[in-house]
Image: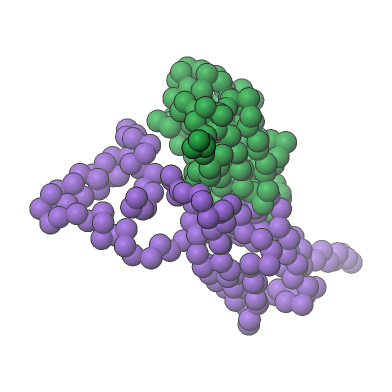
Chain colours: A purple, B green
Amino acid sequence: MSLIRWNPNRELGWFPSDVLNMQREINKMFDTFFRGSEQEESALLPSIWSPATDIAEHDNEYVVKVELPGVSKDEVKITMEENVLTIRGEKKQEKESKNSSFHRVERSYGAFQRCFTLPTNVRAEKIDASFNNGMLSIVLPKSEESKPKQIEVKVK
Amino acid sequence: MENKNMTARVEKNGGSTLTSPYRQESVTVPTADIYETPDAYVLSLDMPGATKEGISLKLDKGVLAVEASVGSIHAESATVLRREIRTTGYHRAFTLGEGIDRENVDAKFEEGVLTVKLFKSPAVKPKEIQIH
């Protein structure tokens, strides 16, 4: 059985809103007709995946959330250098036994790395990370000076 | 509210969930791996952000449907600087073939992955035949 990379568009069918996608598919159709199979070529390239990440700013901290389903906390390494936050790791494919065979592989596996430049006011020594339901949360507290302050000005 | 809408739409669609009006609402079709062992089919679905309590797994007329809603992952007061995670829920259905024991299904949710084990019915299990 040959493995073909999953393309959600193929499976989901057509959406009226996805005219661009449709155009791309038609272009691909012509391309493959005249030049042979494009699909096979691209399927041979190593798949690259980068987990979806959100960054939110709170009053006292920044919170980074990364979607990492099926990745255990030992497989992730988080580093902070200067003000660049790097999240790297590897998602391994687990299979129950040698006598099992795959029918469908859509989930992404392999190494990943994401880097984000953060504002300089993060207290690197206070960074905290936790895993919950396949979602990695990294809390980066802001330094005292940068927290919003309210100064009362007396009017004389 | 959100959830009610979703069920209503599923019914209207007659359960055909992959051609979906959900996309605009960011209900994600979770990616799935399926593998076969000698005694079962194992289905793994990536559903980060879902909770065990928030997942509904139903087997009806040979269709296995998974549905989950995911709440907002950021506090309301926060300013979102980068947004790549757009999932508000998950929905996917699988049609089961013959030879699956409908009464014997096992499911667990760990690290954001839903694993469903569908045991084969005894009739289709490989059997060693004794030679006399």
- Residue B119 drawn at (x, y percent): 58, 34
Which residue is rendered at x = 61% and y = 47% of the image? B113
What is the x, y in percent for residue A42? 29, 60
- Which one is in front, B20 or B116? B116
Is residue B49 found left or right of B21 in the rendered image?
A: right
Q: Measured along the vertical axis of the image, is residue A30 above or below residue A137?
A: above
Please identify the quarter of the rendering in which residue A66 is found: bottom right
Q: Is residue A74 visible?
A: yes
Vertical arrangement, residue A77 with respect to residue A41, above or below: below
Rendered location of residue A15, percent (x, y): 34, 34
**In the picture provided, is A39 more to the left or to the right than A96?**
left
Residue positioned most to the left: A34
Q: Is residue A55 left or right of residue A110?
A: right
Q: Residue furthest front?
A: B132
The correct choice, above or below, for A109 with respect to A113 in the image is: above
Using the rendered image of the protein, determine whether residue B28 is visible from the camera's viewpoint.
Answer: no
| Point 46% across, 28% down: residue | B97
Which quarter of the rendered picture does the C terminus of chain A lie within?
bottom right
Task: Name the residue furthest bottom.
Answer: A82
The structure residue drawn at horizontal position 68% and vertical position 67%, both measured from the top left corner, is A74
